[in-house]
Image: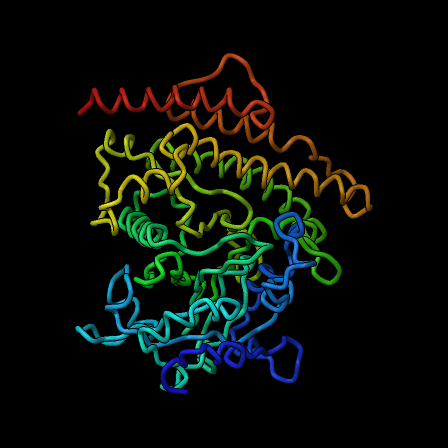
Amino acid sequence: MGEWPANGSYAMSHASEWRVGGSVDVTGQLPGFIRRFLALEQRHLWRPERWRNVTDDEQLCRRYLPESCAAFRLPCFWVQRKYLYVYGGRDEGAALGLAEEFGPDSRVLFLVHPAELPRYAEFLAHVRARDGTDTGVSLCATPTSSTRTVLAWRDGCPNTAFFAKLSLRCGSLGDRRIQRRRAARSVGLSALVQQLGHGMPPAVAWFPETLAMVPRLMPEGGLIIRSIPMEMKEGSVVPAPLFSLMGGSGSDPPLLLQMLGQDAELARSVVTEVLLAKFAGIWVDLVFGMGLMLEAHGQDLLLALSKDMVPCGGFYYRDFEGLTVDWGLRRARGLSEGPSLPHSCDWYETYETLGYPLHQLVSWKIRTSLFDYICLVLAELDLAAVEWRTRGLMPSGEKWEGELTMLFSRHLRKAIRERYGMREDREYDIHRDLSRFVKFLMRVRSEVLQSKGSSR
């Protein structure tokens, strides 16, 4: 094909598709544990219609939605580094086959979501991008639970797999393009967390985001590369997004229902000991010990499963774009700001606010993190339990609906009392009075700051 044609006529032909279940199923190249992960991502969605409506949306073809379970060719183009902002170490790009040896005229492999090709035509023509297939690079891709984030690998080489979070803009999903500051932030915060290493709660692991690219002529059209954790590559762990506990139907019933049918006691412990008690402790340790607040909804927070699909008792977190930081607490505790964070010249917009003024408030960051978990995980699991009971799917004797948020509230208070000796006068469900609880948490934070300040 050579260089990108100025009229962008290559857009439609490049996005050819393979259908799962068709004559050629390229996802069959992937190892079994990756396919199990994809099944949880694509076939166990929980009420996706609430987040998008593609009925009348012609901008996004249905084949790119997770529930289509489709594979397609991922457009990729060699672009000289000088035309891009590139964030992340040099070794990461080379290891994944996305970058040439570093030099003044070296190139990186720039990836584009098929639905976005027409929007990149002018940029690709201007920089004289070369189609990756001309050099033997043919990338396969399939969507994860996030339409814009795909699992990609070189055709015939499943060991090269990685996740790519791509810019995407459409009517049903809104503007999901990746701005320069968000790309830099993701790589920077990922490096910060990796540097903390053993100081982090051992029950939470991470999907590193080691590389990002943003066109200089399209500062809102970037991409982020997310690595597959080593234990996942080795097949010893299968991370399951929390929404898969309640999402699914037919031959792919909700994961928690499957657990209840196989071992009710184990399923019950997953809810009470892992989702409630353990995560409460993790959340408190991250917020007041490390100054980190997760975007803890059912997509970004994942449950660690063994290769036999048995819960291991821990969590995974992905998507550093949603991680927020209490920099004041970190400084008070003498914690490093980590490596030289990329794009720190625009610190306020990049690392403090995400472009939203309220995000400069620690109280807002804490509130958002708790809201995501209480309302978008626990309250939704309550609703699922009510639905299952109505349909006769819940085993007799299992009656937790309406209790999860209250129980989690108790575990949060217990974790704070054990670690910092602070307690509230009255017990209540923070799901119903989150603002009141956030005020209490800010008092806890003040106590932590004072105690660390006086000890220095």
Relative depth, front residue between 230 and 227 = 227
Relative depth, front residue between 231 and 372 = 372
Query: Could you say where residue 352 lies in the image, as x and y percent from the top left?
Result: 33, 38
Q: Residue furthest top?
A: 425
Residue drawn at x 62%, y 46% is 266
Query: Could you say where residue 178 lies in the image, as x and y percent from the top left?
Result: 41, 55
Q: Is residue 190 above or below residue 396?
A: below
Q: Is residue 25 above or below residue 182?
A: below
Query: Could you say where residue 265 lies in the image, as x and y percent from the top left?
Result: 65, 44
As drawn, is 52 to the left or to the right of 274?
Answer: right
Residue drawn at x 72%, y 41% is 385
Query: Could you say where residue 350 lies in the image, as x and y percent from the top left?
Result: 32, 45
Q: Quadrant of residue 134?
A: bottom left
Quadrant for the N terminus in the image: bottom left
Q: Is residue 244 above or below residue 400?
A: below
Relative depth, front residue between 92 and 428 = 92
